[in-house]
Image: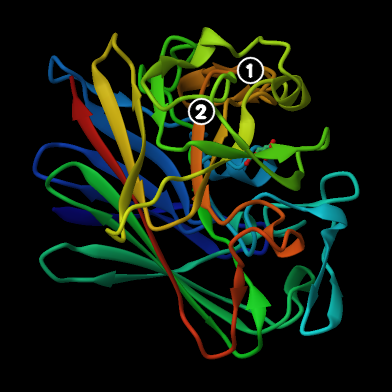
Amino acid sequence: MSIEKNLFGLLPNGKEVYIYTLKNNNGMEVKVSTYGGTIVSLLTSDKNGEFHDVVLGYDSLEGYLKGDKYFGALVGRFANRIQYGTFKLNDKEYKLATNNGPNHLHGGIKGFDKVLWNATLIEDKNNILQLSYLSVDGEEGYPGNLNVNVKYILTEDNSLELHYEATSDKDTIINLTNHSYFNLCGHSSGDVLNHKIMINADKFTVNDKYSIPTGEIRNVDGTPMDFRTLTPIGANINSDYEQITFGNGYDHNWVLNTTDSPLTKVAKAICEHTGISLDVYTTQPGVQFYTANFLDGSDIGKDNAIYNMRNAFCLETQYFPNSINCSNFKSPILKAGEKYDHKTIYKFSTI
Ligand code: BGC
């Protein structure tokens, strides 16, 4: 394992942005930018020993400063949507920044994907990269000074572990995730409809037409939302099932079947062409499976790749979207002085 630090670019205010390259002894390599805690590239081996970059992104910092797709970003304070950007906590009504019509999406106008993180290296046998950020009381409308630490750990079994920890000096809400857009055939290889995916969930949260969970939890059985066994992503993506038409494809939260073990294997995805397989493990109760329905070819990515609709998929582990407004969902409240502590592991192998 090794970690290398290089300058990625300068922010308009002149501040330096660094890119850290984590490498393991098998040649797997992950690049992380201190701007937005973004995973910029992830090289992993295919079944013939050739390496592919399996995440979408930009070649330079400028791309990330202009882009609005959250490629690889560390999303916070609250992943996904909060209806009308409002919620009640301890009898007080909070009004967050709205940036998705009348709703709040991915932390607001300047979410964690658009801030500069402070990097430290924890040099033990794992060589950990830790990114830290203090989100001040009132930022984007959220209560409490929130101290966030996210560890990026690349292991010798080809796992990228993301360990999220946070504390606040006031009761608040929090929901952190990573927004990598994966394409296991290679980031520039076109649509992911032939990828096979498994999501370990018997249920999903039903959305309204603005992609906000209504509070209803529905069985996947007999619906195009059933991914309990490996199924091609494209099998039912053009179905007229109302949930799919609302999302223009998959853009929903699955209610994960959890086990007694703190880390559950919640999803698997495979590109049979490269043989690259991704297993996702998490401590979180939900995963947003999003099939890049809003990519439209306007993003020029790495190596001049043009990213079109459904050229990638995201598996964003998290509390359920809008959970603060749905009392039957697991609560995303972080009490003052308590610790938010979640892990997600993306493990790569070949078939
Ligand atoms: C959301 C999508 C959104 C995308 C990019 C996903 O997490 O569910 O609706 O378009 O992020 O912002």
Position of residue 247 measured from the top left corner of the image (x, y, whole percent): 72, 27
Residue 88 image offset from top left, x and y in percent: 81, 74
Q: Nearer the viewer, residue 188 or 292?
A: 292
Q: Give 348 or 69, whichever is nearer the viewer.
A: 348
Q: Quadrant of ligand 1?
A: top right
Residue appearing at x 31%, y 63% in the figure: 129
Tell me which residue sits at (90%, 49%) in the image.
102
Q: Secondary structure at mark 2?
A: loop
Name the residue beneath numbered marker 2: 313
> Which residue matches tag 1?
309
Q: Is residue 208 toward the left or the right of residue 25 in the image?
A: right
Tell which of 146 and 4 is nearer to you. Answer: 146
Q: Is residue 191 visible?
A: no
- Amino acid type at mark 1: Met
Q: Position of residue 182 (x, y in %)?
A: 44, 30
**Spatial separation of the CA atoms under disc 1 and disc 2:** 10 Å
